[in-house]
Amino acid sequence: MIQIVMGALIREGQILLVHRSPNRPVYPDVWGLGGGHLETGETELAGLARELDEELGVQIDPGSAIHLCRLQAGRGGESVHFSAWIVKQWAGTPVNAAPEEHDEIRWFRPEELPPLAHEPVRTALMEAMR
């Protein structure tokens, strides 16, 4: 089983999304939340903090993260489990610290959200932002 953790940075009613490079083997050329694979033995919040630091250069307070939703794709050993979180508190200015993974980052108002790699996450974000 593969575990993925993702975080929605929220600022002044806007959500930060990353645009996955068209060269990525999985989910190329789509918008999504920053995040990635959990390492062995890592908790979701520790993985979220590490991934958002690696990809966006921000340091989150894991205790301030609010769980948004969970998704599962596939079955058995090949299944992928996604966990999405809302993050309203962090230190640092978000930048594209992983240009090999993303070709753009951008803030969006909820009504401007583009289609995401995982549409149930988009739906959950829209509901959470109301």
Image: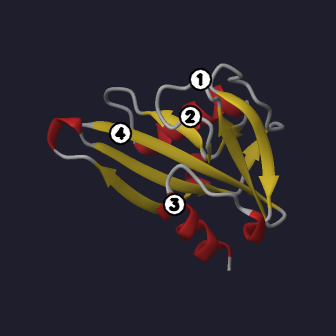
SS type, badge 4? strand
Dot label at residue 28: 2
**Label 3: how many residues lie within 10 Å, few (<14), some (14-19) or many (20+)?**
few
Q: Residue at x 80, y 52 (%)?
A: 107
Which numbered disc, 3 or 4, marks the residue closer to the eye? Answer: 3
Residue 64: where, in percent of width, then height? 61, 56
**Label 2: how many residues lie within 10 Å, few (<14), some (14-19) or many (20+)?**
some
* Amino acid type of the residue tagged 1 in the rendering: Asn
The Cα atoms of the two marked residues, 4 and 2, are separated by 19 Å
Answer with mark 1 or mark 4, whichever residue precedes in sequence: 4
Whether residue 54 is situated above or below residue 47 in the rendered picture: above
Q: Residue at x 57, y 63 (%)?
A: 122
The Cα atoms of the two marked residues, 2 and 3, are separated by 15 Å
Q: Is residue 67 visible?
A: no
The Cα atoms of the two marked residues, 1 and 4, are separated by 22 Å
Whether residue 102 is situated above or below residue 66 in the rendered picture: above
Q: Residue at x 59, y 53 (%)?
A: 116
**Label 1: how many residues lie within 10 Å, few (<14), some (14-19) or many (20+)?**
few
SS type, badge 3? helix
* Amino acid type of the residue tagged 2 in the rendering: Pro
To which residue does mark 1 refer?
23
Dot label at residue 3: 4
Answer with mark 3 or mark 4, whichever residue precedes in sequence: 4
* Mark 2 vs 1: CB contact within 8 A: yes
Q: Quadrant of residue 102?
A: top right
The Cα atoms of the two marked residues, 3 and 4, are separated by 18 Å
Answer with mark 1 or mark 3, whichever residue precedes in sequence: 1
Q: Is residue 83 left or right of residue 22?
A: left
The Cα atoms of the two marked residues, 1 and 3, are separated by 21 Å
Quadrant location of the C terminus in the rendered image: bottom right
